[in-house]
Amino acid sequence: MPAASPDHLPGNPALSETPGGRLITESQFEVSFDSVTADTVADEITPHRVVKKLGVGFWIAVGFLVLLTSMAILAPYLPFVDEPNATDFLLQAEAGPSYEHWMGVDAIGRDVFSRVVWGARVSLSIAALTVAFGLAIGGVVGLTAGFYGGLYEKISVGSLDIMLAFPPLILALALVSFLSEPGTQNATLFTVTLTLTVLTVPAFARIARATTLGFAQREFVQASRTLGATKGRVLLRDIFPNVVPPMLSFALIVVAIVIVGEGTLSFLGLSVSSPTPTWGSLINDGRDYLDSAPHISLFPCLIMFLTLLAFNYVGDVLRRRFDVKEVSL
Amino acid sequence: MRYVLTKVVQLVIVLLAVSFLTFSFLKLLEWRTGVGPEIAILGTGVGNEEAVAEVRGDLNLDDPYFVQYGRWLGNAVTLDLGESYANNSSVSELIGNAFPKTALLMFYAMFFSLLISVPLGIISAYRADGVFDKVAGTTAFGFLSVPTFIFGVLLVYLFALELRWLPATGYVTFTENPWEHVRHMILPVTALMVGQIAVYTRLLRTDMISTLQEDYISVARAKGMPNRRILLKHAFRPSSFSLLTVAAINVGTLIGGSVVIEQIFAINGMGTLIVSSIFKRDYLVIQGCVLIIAIVFVTANFLVDILYAYLDPRIRHARSVS
């Protein structure tokens, strides 16, 4: 490690905490990731001691997420979840919460709770697909870039960095508008997933590359090399398994970011088309009745907030365990 | 000086790449729709050969691709971003009308979020793991899980509809009526800045905790220097650099947030312009907005990098040593 490297200076370590740690300039980026191996980072920077127990909050958050996900998956079969567009004609429109309708009904008598559950299907499946693609593409690019280096690394890292020159939501809006098919007012599931994937790849690639660089210098990798292991074997057997845990804990935080991204797009009316409910469109549609029937908008807000909080919390606990730096989209 | 020069070269490369990508959006449109951009812009089913030929001419579509890019870039440099075919005015005129409102919104949000989070961060770091720190930290973590649009909706519900303290929508310029301007800006700026405050407070806290463990702080303490002076003069100064960098990066988040906020509070800024253009399929306006926003974003980060090096000689020297 060069003596003059700025990471030993007081100002710099917190750059790793950069929540919007995008577009970190090359010099800072090189220094903060290349020359520091994973364990020195853990010793010097992380102010929190490694958490031994996961804690009650962690399990509550996990429980909430499991409940939400299973309800979303089983929505068509659950007795207490109606069809999202089924109308209760017996009830007054905009009626508040009751035993029949836990979160009340909306302006045309549709059950808000059911629509939130069906909305979770859209939000969670887009998030899951996006993160899976982002992990796969970003992981492969980052691993190979960090491992092989050279011109390939420069080009791949450089071209991913260019994407970070666009503010994320602006790039999402541009991609959604230029990728949507003519004649359809709203972008399809495919367009939204593709757009959000494009946005997540640079962050995943960055983490994968940084972790790879950290492990490439470790003794067991050197030993493996000395014993005559081929490059492919070192990459797959020695480095890859170590890159997975931090990537996965980071992926949970990205899930939250993607849910916000999808929510924002559908709030603006640019995601999967209505009558299919999504969280963003539920909140947006409910805005018109905020005065007379606030529950139409506020219950989806609450569920979305709890979901994001749970993902962030679980991700944060795991991240502290595996010590991934916060590099968000 | 060498540092500045490398940064300038980097800036030029990034700007060229960004403009090329933005230009290529029309190619993306062609790939997805299967028709030329002139058809996509005019809308399907338009049989008007003359109009199609005119748009083809406007976009130089008969030239080779890189010549098209060169011409487009040349026009963009002179602020000619093409015509809005849906609005019958030039793209730069539309952006010129919308940009100041967004810029002001973002400026307020940036200014007040820093103003609020600096003391919060310093106190949290000074009494790390104390009651104030715990409360502030938990609140910040919670606020980070609230998307901007939810915050906007909640503020409208609470302060505009329930309490009726502040107007829910609209924009009044300062020169028109300063009092109404402030009243109309409070809710959008608050919605925009809450997430930022959470980010800055957390950042400053971690940063200052590590600074406060440095030897020179102990020396200052040993000399009997008052705490206030140590915190502000010795500890905050180095931490303010990373705050500055993150603030510049967060300009991107702020732009995204203001798109949503402008929709909720009916402010005719860049965000409203982009979203309405998406629905009108007014592609050149979207392209122009994206280009301008990306340039502003990249340039802001460049300026902060330069400022950072100017304020902190370690950055300049780190380069020349290695």
Image: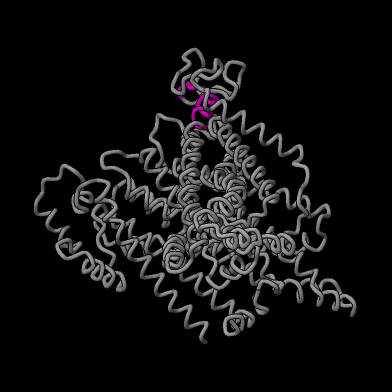
Question: Residue A180: which quarter of the image?
Answer: top left
What secondary structure characterizes most of the magenta part? helix
Question: Residue B122: which quarter of the image?
Answer: bottom right
Position above or below: A326 against A79: below
Q: Position of residue A94 (x, y in %)?
A: 52, 24
Which quarter of the figure is the N terminus of chain A placed in? Answer: bottom right
Was residue A110 drawn as part of the magenta stretch in this picture? yes
**Residue at image location 65% in from the left, 60% down from the top:** A17
- Residue at the extreme bottom: B1
User: In the rendered structure, which segment of residues is drawn in magenta?
Assistant: A108-120
Q: Position of residue A181 (x, y in %)?
A: 29, 42
Q: Is residue A328 left or right of residue A136?
A: right
One can see residue A63 in this view: yes
**Residue at image location 44% in from the left, 48% down from the top:** A197
Q: Is residue B42 left or right of residue B246?
A: left
- Residue at the extreme front: A227
**Residue at image location 58% in from the left, 32% down from the top:** A299
Q: Position of residue B55 (x, y in %)?
A: 17, 57
Q: Quick one: B78 or B315, which is closer to the camera?
A: B315
**Residue at image location 18% in from the left, 64% down from the top:** B60
One can see residue B100 in this view: no
Q: Is residue A77 left or right of residue A322?
A: left
Q: Quick one: A152 or B56, which is closer to the camera?
A: A152
Q: Quick one: B227 or B167, which is closer to the camera?
A: B227
Position above or below: B152 against B179: above
Q: Position of residue A24 (x, y in %)?
A: 55, 66
